Amino acid sequence: MKAFDIKKGNVVEHNGGVYQIRDIDRSSPQGRGGNVRFRFTMYSVPGGNKLDASFDADDNLTEVELLRRQATFSYKDGDAFVFMDDEDYTPYMLDAEVLGDDAGYITEGLGGCYVQVIDELPVALQLPQHVTLEVVETPPELKGGTATKRPKPAKLSTGIEIMVPEYITNGERILVNTTTGEFGGRAD
């Protein structure tokens, strides 16, 4: 497929490796005869190593046949996360290093995930856009601090830390954007 046909989430072959496209920047030079260039932010599958590569609009890339299976997080087995297929209950095991930072968003019974499978091997996980996590530790709100929108750090139930607005307190359930790692509002 041509570079201009590629969308976020596609999996392509490049330099002998398999990569998932996470971000696309399009630049079109203003000069005469300028070709449109695409800069892809790609992550290796499996492994999750980041790679930035630029392509002309007409460059050919081979799309890898990838199976996306909707799954729900079931349990942790040592360092591995086990997801159950929502249709046929096939268990998929993904190691913590394959998940990388995404492991911090996985909670008991998390649904809406997609396990990406190549040749019957689970290689990557696509999380839902937002997940609900509980705030376990955050400094108290400063009185009179509501006029300024100062964010404060909050430790969440999975161990990750994000910045939250000052009015959020311990024990609250919040939405976290899994793409940016940012606060997305109160959950309840």
Image (tube, rainbow, N blue to C red):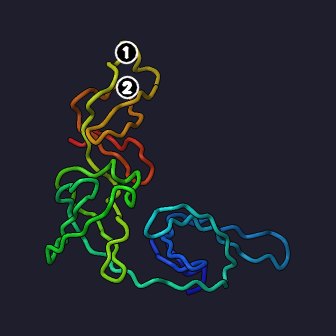
Q: Is residue 155 above or below residue 75?
A: above
- For the point 40% across and 20% down, which residue is it? 146
Rendered position, 7 above or below 125: below
Classify mark 2: residues with Cα within 10 Å, few (<14), some (14-19) or many (20+): many
Indicate which disc, 2 or 1, sits on the residue closer to the N terminus. 1
Q: Which mark is residue 142?
A: 1
Image position, residue 25 (x, y; %): 62, 65
- 79 or 90: nearer the eye? 79
Q: Secondary structure at mark 2?
A: loop
Which residue appears farthest toward the right when viewing the image? 32
**Is the C-beta separation of discs 2 and 1 under 8 Å?**
yes
Q: Amino acid at mark 1?
A: Leu
Image-quadrant location for residue 69: bottom left
According to the image, label 2 marks what residue?
A: 166
- Residue type, mark 2 in image: Glu
As measured in the structure, the alpha-carbon distance from the residue carrying label 2 to the one carrying label 1 is 8 Å
Return the x and y of residue 149 as percentages of the image width and height.
45, 27
